Amino acid sequence: MENKQTLGTAISNFEEQFKRFQDSGNKPPEFLLPKKRAAAAIAGMASSDKRTSGKKIVLKTYRQLLTPEQCFGEFSAIAQQLEDDKKLLVQAYDLFVAMVDINSQLGDDATFISDFTIASPLTQRERYTVGKDFVFLQFWLQWEAKRTDYVPVLRLARGLPVWQLIFIPSGNFSWTDGELAVVQLLEEEFYKNKVLVSDVTEARDDSGAGE
């Protein structure tokens, strides 16, 4: 059974506290009375514990996605599903890009593909739809799969209780405040001093490396 409630609660706490991450331990002002200072110190420690717990769960969740077999075991069903989910997202991305290419080559102003919604088992995973784990897959797709021109998004179909997988141009996409906090933490921990580039850019750089 997925630990959605624990992860969701931890990330929510993490989101609330992340903006104050640079604070100096939530120390109370010196002018507070002793009792108030004690109460403020206790509250500060509790907030610090929540931040630490939230950060650990965020980092652990992404590490599990990166190396599921190491985290869960070679024959673990969870590890296999995570590997499948990564492959499914890459497959959906490549399919979407192929449709865009076909549309540009064969379509015109009158005849074109208008619905780019992708059918995928990912839309059936509660951990990604009603949960908060999809941000980890979105992030992984950019940094590890090097698919950066478009960003996958899960959304509810209009008027229907059905989730859809769509892709939007990366230039039109923006993280929510909570997602941005998670992304910044992951970038700092796993990709510090690395530059996010697309496959096209990398291929161009490699081809000109020997010139």
Image (cartoon, rainbow, N blue to C red):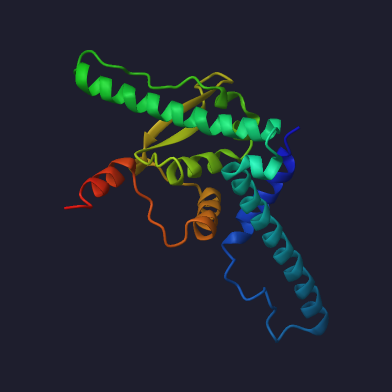
Q: Residue at x 62, y 76 (%)?
A: 24
Q: Which residue is situated farthest in the top direction here?
A: 111
**Residue 127 in view, yes or no:** yes
Q: Is residue 5 above or below residue 60?
A: above
Nearest the camera: 184 or 36?
184
Give the mark count.
0
Q: Residue furthest right?
A: 35
* Residue 19, percent from left and from top: 56, 62
**Which quarter of the image is occupied by the N terminus?**
top right
Answer yes or no: is residue 107 visible.
no
Q: Residue at x 53, y 19 (%)?
A: 159
Most extreme residue toward the front, as rendered? 210
158 to the left or right of 80: left
Q: Position of residue 39 (x, y in %)?
A: 80, 73
Q: Which residue: 60% across, 72% down?
A: 23
Q: Is residue 111 above or below residue 75?
A: above
Q: Quadrant of residue 130?
A: top right
Is residue 169 positioned above or below 14 on the image? above
Residue plotted at (33% across, 41% down)? 199
The residue at the far left in this view is 211
Residue 131, percent across and down?
64, 37
Q: Which percent across, then down, holds residue 203?
A: 28, 43
Depth order, front residue of 73/129: 73
Q: Quadrant of residue 135?
A: top right
State left or right for residue 46 relative to residue 179.
right
